[in-house]
Amino acid sequence: MLQKGSVCEIVDNSGAKEAKCICILGGFFNKVALSGTLILVSIRKLRLIRRVKLGQIFLAVVTRTRKWTKFKDGVQSKFDQNAIVLLTPKQQIFGSKVGGPVSRKLRRRKFLKILLSSGSTFF
């Protein structure tokens, strides 16, 4: 569960390491973001090889959250940290690869490209 002002890890190869959540999109009174939610982020830390700059603002989608997620088939999933993937203004992936597992909820939210580029199992 991400809140406004929380710091989260970026798991794609765009060159950013951490970002801070500025705004949660998709409603007027949204206070928390779960898996598959669009958010606005500001870049806070960078990796060695990068295509982004400090303080740049990006659209992102939440791929993993610490909050338990229950599915209709009875499966529950929970991750160790909150993670996001940066998107372009046309809602396409900014990087080319996604590291680590991602939530199954992205399939319902029309982010199949993230599921395919993650290369690991979906929880």
Image (cartoon, rainbow, N blue to C red):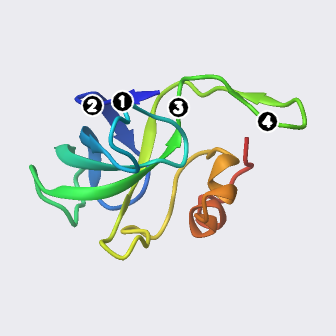
Residue that numbered label 1 is attached to: 31
Residue that numbered label 3 is attached to: 65
* Apparent side of residue 71 relative to residue 49 in the rendered image (left or right): right
How far across and how far down the image is residue 13, in percent?
39, 60
Q: CA distance from mark 4 to mark 3?
A: 15 Å
Report which quarter residue 89 is drawn in. bottom left
| Vertical comparison of 121 with 80: above or below | below
Disc 2 residue type (three-letter): Lys
Q: CA distance from mark 4 to mark 1?
A: 22 Å
Q: Do residues under tags 1 and 2 come within 8 Å of each other at their CB atoms?
A: yes
Q: CA distance from mark 1 to mark 2?
A: 7 Å
Along the polypeptide, which appears first: circle 1 or circle 2? Answer: 2
Residue found at x 38% / y 46%: 27
Residue that numbered label 2 is attached to: 4
Query: Circle 4 sits in a helix, a strand or a loop, which is it?
Result: loop
Instruction: Tell us which disc is closer to us: 4 or 1.
Output: 1
Query: Circle 3 sits in a helix, a strand or a loop, which is it?
Result: loop
Residue found at x 18% / y 62%: 52
* Apparent side of residue 60 relative to residue 82 in the rendered image (left or right): left
Disc 3 residue type (three-letter): Thr
Q: Do residues under tags 1 and 3 come within 8 Å of each other at their CB atoms?
A: no
Along the polypeptide, which appears first: circle 4 or circle 2? Answer: 2
| Quarter of the figure that contains the C terminus | top right
